[in-house]
Image (tube, rainbow, N blue to C red):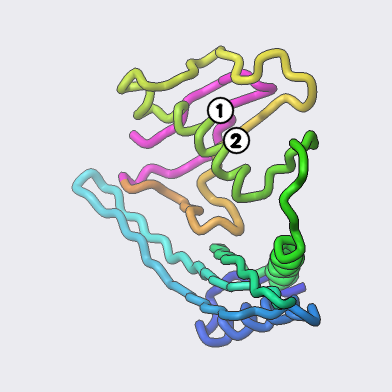
Amino acid sequence: QVHTYLGALAHEVGAKIAEAVYAADNFELGSINALEVFVKKLTVSVKNSRGIDKKEVKYSAMLEAIPTWNDGESVELYEAKNFNSLDTDDITAEIARKMEEVRDRGYAKKPDKKLDCPVVLGSFELKELFGELTYGLNYGSVYSHSNPFSEGDAIQKAPKHDKLSVTMKGALTGSVDSALFDAAGTTLTDREIIKDGIVTSYFGNS
């Protein structure tokens, strides 16, 4: 497993990412139709008259791939992945899942009757779900009186299974939104805003 920050030469990092993507290209009727890799270095600096002087150098990468299945009719999927640390095994596993998904879509048929089955949320759907839940707990929403929940409210009504707990983090390995401080230069710290389905705190910048 290769797990390192992206501070190496951009072309070397890009080559490792490409190798990891094509390591999943081992389906007889499947292929990676297109691949683009972007590696970025970003310097964030905040300085003001009140004595704040902070700087952070951040590295990130993005890959865009089009897994394709060809068996009489061609089926394509688009996959984009953003990250701030390099885990080649994770990249290969994710592209392999997409290759299986595009294969399954190629052979999928419309059901004759209504389906009744569990729904499994993937990482993208979970990101959207938690984004909607936590957006309403931002101080900006509270200030504008648009927050759907307040401290002490139960987000989950009589849950039958796991109770939801959410912690907001500033620095987070793997996330391109990871940051040590916000736009005002305020140091970011972890804060639990939902515990066992109950709102325990708000979050946001000054």
Answer whether labels 2 and 1 touch (C-beta < 8 Å): yes
Q: Is residue 90 visible?
A: no
In space, the residues marked 2 and 1 are separated at their CA atoms by 6 Å
Q: Nearer the viewer, residue 120 or 20?
A: 120
| Residue 39 vertical position relative to residue 148 in the rendered view, above or below | below
Majority secondary structure in the magenta region: loop
**Horizontal and vertical percent position of residue 13:** 58, 81
Residue at 55% from the left image edge and 64% from the top image edge: 80
How would you rate the neighbour count of disc 2 (Cα within 10 Å): few for under 14, some for 14-19, many for 20 or more? few
- Seen from the viewer's position, the closer of residues 105 and 59 is 105
Callout 2: helix, strand or loop? Answer: strand
Q: Is residue 157 above or below residue 125?
A: above
User: In the rendered image, is residue 21 in sight?
Assistant: yes
Res 193 label? 1
Q: Which residues are magenta?
A: 184-206
Q: Quadrant of residue 119?
A: top right
Residue tagged 2? 167
Between 41 and 81, which is closer to the camera in this rendering? 81
Q: Residue at x 50, y 58 (%)?
A: 176
